[in-house]
Image: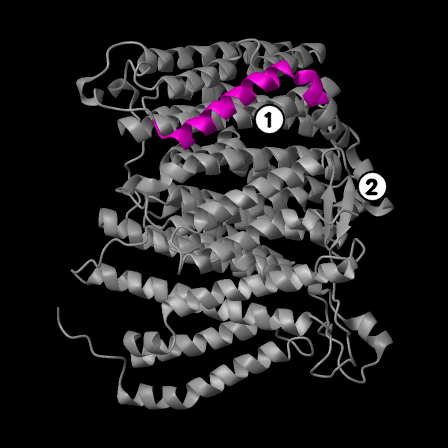
Amino acid sequence: MIVYLLCSFLFVLGLYCLVAKKNIIKKIIGIITMEYSVNLFLVLVGYRARGIAPILSKGADKAEFIAKSVDPLPQALVLTAIVIGLGTIALMVAICIRLYERYGTFDMTEIRRLRG
Amino acid sequence: MNHILPLFVAVPLGTAFIILILAKVWRKAGVPFALLTSICLVIFSVSVIGQASIYRMGNWPPPWGIVLVLDGLSTLLLLTISVISFFALLFSIRYMDRYTAKPKFYALFMLLVAGMNGVVLSGDFFNLFVFLEIASIASYALVAFGCEEEELEASFKYLILSGVASTFILLGIAILYSLTGTLNMADVARTIGNMPANNAVLFAISMFLMGFGLKAALVPFHPWLPDAHPAAPAPISAMLSGVLIKALGMYVLIRLIFNVFGLSPFLSSVLMILGGLSMVVGGLLAIGQDDLKRLLAYSSISQIGYVAVGLALGTPLGIMGGLFHLINHATFKSLLFLSAGAIEYSTDTRKLSKMGGLSNRLPVTTTSAAIGFLSISGIPPLNGFWSKLIIIIALVQAGHYILASVAVLVSFLTILYFMRVQRHLFFGDLPAKLAKITEVPYLMRVSLVLLAIMCLAMGLLYPFLSGTILDPARDVILEGTAYVHRVFGV
Amino acid sequence: MTQEPEGMTLIVKSIGRLVINFIMLFGIYIILYGHLSPGGGFPGGVIVATAFILLMLSFGRKTALRKFGDTTASLLDNFAALSFLTIGFLGLIGGYFFLNFIDRGIPFQLFSAGTIPLANIAIGLKVSACLYAVFVALAIFGKVLAGPEQDGVGPAEEKPTDSGEHRR
């Protein structure tokens, strides 16, 4: 139970960072923290005490394998989510660099052309 | 078994990469390939009208394998996506002349289409999430395509908010997985149906409402839309406002609420409140805008509220109205955004206060824009009138008198702010600065005129439309969690 | 503009020269044995990409771009993505998209499991080229930002890393 609480703490921490910080790089760090806390949650959901990797090795006992192996689905989902997160982060950083080029600042309160 | 289904995703995806490879040797590779793919997709989506099938990827049966599910609802969305993307592409051929890096534009456009088609077809949460992110990442990049201050700022806002939405969606998926042990939508629906009601499901639903509500720009989650949609190049604004918020937001919400969780009175009222708020707030905020595209973006929020209210009613008539308004909004809003793009193309401004008397100079553009305005304000016999009428009648029939009167009032509000636009666009004197403007290129006009004709035709041919594509879509929504039997039965 | 020193110190260069080949070899091993052991296209591709990134960090931008240019990277990236899709299309021969149509062979052999190793190789190429291209793009961005000579605002768009779809 405590791990889930820590997980949600991480999530809220990321959300706080996203909302309260003015620096756009810090905002990106906040969003990454949120994403990874959800990934951690997914991995924890798939955790199984004394489970084995869901890869059949040579000469393994099939009955024991079926009884003990963990579900590969959350791990695959987490891996995909990490890859997607990587793509998003690369784009975010690229946009940040461009923003710095244009505005000369990382401060979100000064990047305010759009209103209304 | 229908082998066209995976092609909906694979063909645009492949085209995107082919364009990027060929662009190294042939700078103009983007246009022919993208256009050809888009025509193919239109043909594919017309050919699947009236069909319902399940495609098992690699012949793995559900719930173990990946399934693509085609039914009336997905057909409706597929048709909308491919038709609108075809017109947007046709428009973009000349419009994109002012931008550099055109092959990348077309590649990203194809990725966007592939992502949306994937979302509409996928039968499990895993693929739904992946395709959602493909479409989202492509749209972030497309919003920032101009690389000017405003575009970058809008794209960054959109990125952050949409990133939060994706996180919430992933959290919802994680909770559902921990509850049911599966990610196949039909399997999740079956498992939840056999379980006693519990709060975890409700928590997951609220996560999804937040996430997909943000993607659909329902009101408390809307602030990114009025920035992101105007900042993008006009064809992309048309795609984002016309289809993206529906395919990624409304469609998934409908699919989850009706087919996976089953509509409960509580959910219905939540969605209705969100929809009502969107109608009013979007309409009120649109009145004061001076930027034409920004005004259109706010009006998108208002119109998506109509769709949400109609669908949330859950009665056959309400769903019918919601779906009809969904496709109508896709047509007239993309027409309006493309017209705004055409006006910007020739006058170089989006400010309404700097325009005036354009109807002599740009006859085709302003006429088609006028048809769009009349349609969105609900003037008979254009399509917007019928769908709004159906939604309002359905609201009255279901006894929601307050919401019905709100819908009527917002409809007047829509007329009000488009009257203002008309005054600035068509009447008054031509500013001296704009004395030398000329009509936009031929291809852009073709796309505008065809969309305007579609607006007119969809209003007049409603019985035909309802028989071929709207009725099957409505039946899919009405069948509720019987969706499960369809997926496992084949 | 002051002359930028090419790469890092001699120590880093010597160690890098020793290590890079092994990192790459390990990455290729992970890709090729993806269907038999933990690993596969994505982790292997990341390892191969890190080898190139190490090359760029230790020997400087010019050396790395001479070995593996950004145009090559983006071409390879798109080509690998296309070949992955082609594997999916070839499945239609057997009647289904992404059907594992090649003979599965004997389990636990290197040449077994039908199309899965092929798909792994495609994903490995895609991921390594893509990650390297992202790194190069960001590095060049930083360069443009630091230097006074803005060599043309150029292609107005950063390539989005569409790596999401090609993994599984």
Which residue was labeled with disc 1?
Answer: B326
State which region is magenta. B440-466
Give the percent coordinates (x, y) of residue B394. 68, 14
- Answer with left or right where residue B8 lies relative to residue B426: right
Judged from the image, the secondary structure of the residue bearing numbered disc 2 is: helix
Q: Residue at x 32, y 29 (%)?
A: B344
Any mark on residue B486, and which? 2
Q: Is residue A49 above or below residue B408?
A: below
Q: Is residue B239 visible?
A: yes
- Answer with left or right where residue B418 lies relative to residue B76: left
Q: Quadrant of residue B251?
A: top right
Residue type pointed to by label 2: Arg
Residue type pointed to by label 1: Leu
Q: Quadrant of residue B467?
A: top right
Q: Nearer the viewer, residue B65 or C99?
A: C99
Q: Is residue B171 above or below residue A46?
A: above
How many marks on residues?
A: 2
Q: Nearer the viewer, residue C59 or A103?
A: C59
Give the percent coordinates (x, y) of residue C42. 56, 69
Give the percent coordinates (x, y) of residue C38. 65, 76
Q: Calculate the distance from the C-alpha at mark 2 to the C-alpha at mark 1.
A: 25 Å
Q: Earlier in the sequence, mark 2 or mark 1?
A: 1
Judged from the image, the secondary structure of the residue bearing numbered disc 1 is: helix
Q: Classify mark 2: residues with Cα within 10 Å, few (<14), some (14-19) or many (20+).
A: some
Query: In the orientation shown, which residue stands out farthest toward the left?
Result: C1
